[in-house]
Image (tube, rainbow, N blue to C red):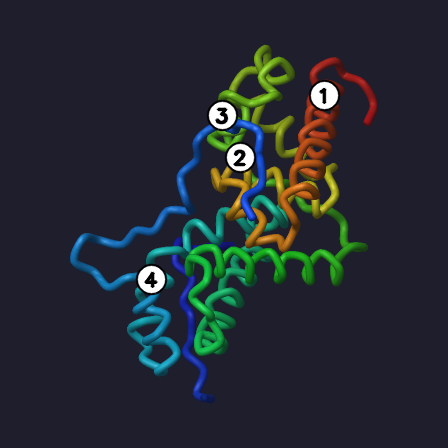
Amino acid sequence: MVSGTCRVKTPSVGGPVSRPEIRSRKPIASKQGPEEPSDEELLARCARREQRGLEELTRRYQAQIYGFLLRLTGSPEDAEEATLEVFLKAWLHADRFQYRARVSTWLFRIAVNIARDLHSRKRARPQEPWPEDEESAAAISTGSAEDDALASLQAGERAKELRSALAKLSASDRELIVLYYFNDADYDEIQEVTGLSYTVLKTRLARARQRLRQHLERAQTGGSP
């Protein structure tokens, strides 16, 4: 179980597209203070094998990455292990970062790839109960197409049904739902994280939302999946 802090060990080895109007979203947030080094500088320190750079980058993004992976995997143990792997990979490959995207987006791209590998390896493993997450239920219901399906559920019951609905989605659908609703990522960031084109992303996200809504409606009416 996660203890609140994942300790990362440092290894010893060295044309515009016309788009529909969508609700405004913030970029994946950094906890950088006004006089603290930028994410890019921290990653550059990692490339120079300065351990303090990795420690500060971990402090800024560990909670976000862990929460993201927890929602993708449904397992605190898997999420903690995968979070450690994210920052290990960031340390090992910091010198390959091209500075074309945000460092935070790059970290989430690493997290998605790790979650995909984990899903492939453990597809046959029984699904563990998903942790309580009432805030996630509130996040997805606010201003989204799922309002009608969620409106009559109480907070605790809503969280339970949402966890169940997320678990029933495919791994690719769950990635998009978690990035869009829980991480509040915009389309550009989701494209960078997942590697999908805008057209494909728009189509897949719409289908994922529809499938999620269907699972939630079935839960609400007591129907079978």
Count of residue discs = 4
Q: Is residue 50 left or right of residue 164?
A: left
**SS for tag 3?**
helix
The residue lying toward the viewer, choosing from 192 and 88, is 192
Q: Which mark is residue 219?
A: 1
Would you call the spot at circle 4 few (<14 residues within 10 Å), some (14-19), or many (20 or more)?
some
Q: Gap between marks 3 and 1, in whole Å? A: 17 Å
Residue 203 image point, x, y percent: 71, 36
**SS for tag 1?**
helix
Which residue is identified by label 3? Answer: 138
Quarter of the view holding residue 42: bottom left
Pick out the residue farthest to the top.
Answer: 152
Q: Callout 2, which amino acid? A: Tyr
Q: Earlier in the sequence, mark 2 or mark 1?
A: 2
For discs 3 and 1, the disc positioned in front in the rendered view: 3
Would you call the spot at circle 1 few (<14 residues within 10 Å), some (14-19), or many (20 or more)?
many
Q: Earlier in the sequence, mark 4 or mark 1?
A: 4
Q: Earlier in the sequence, mark 3 or mark 4?
A: 4
Which residue is identified by label 4? Answer: 39
Q: Residue at x 62, y 29 (%)?
A: 162
Q: Callout 3, which amino acid? A: Ala
Q: Earlier in the sequence, mark 3 or mark 2?
A: 3
Q: Residue at x 74, y 43 (%)?
A: 170
Which residue is identified by label 2? Answer: 181
Would you call the spot at circle 3 few (<14 residues within 10 Å), some (14-19), or many (20 or more)?
some
The residue lying toward the viewer, choosing from 140 and 162, is 140
- Tell me, yes or no, whether the two marked residues, 3 and 4, touch with CB atoms within 8 Å: no
Q: Gap between marks 3 and 2, in whole Å? A: 10 Å
Residue 113 image point, x, y percent: 63, 61
109, above or below 181, in the image: below
Q: Quadrant of the C terminus?
A: top right
For discs 3 and 2, the disc positioned in front in the rendered view: 2
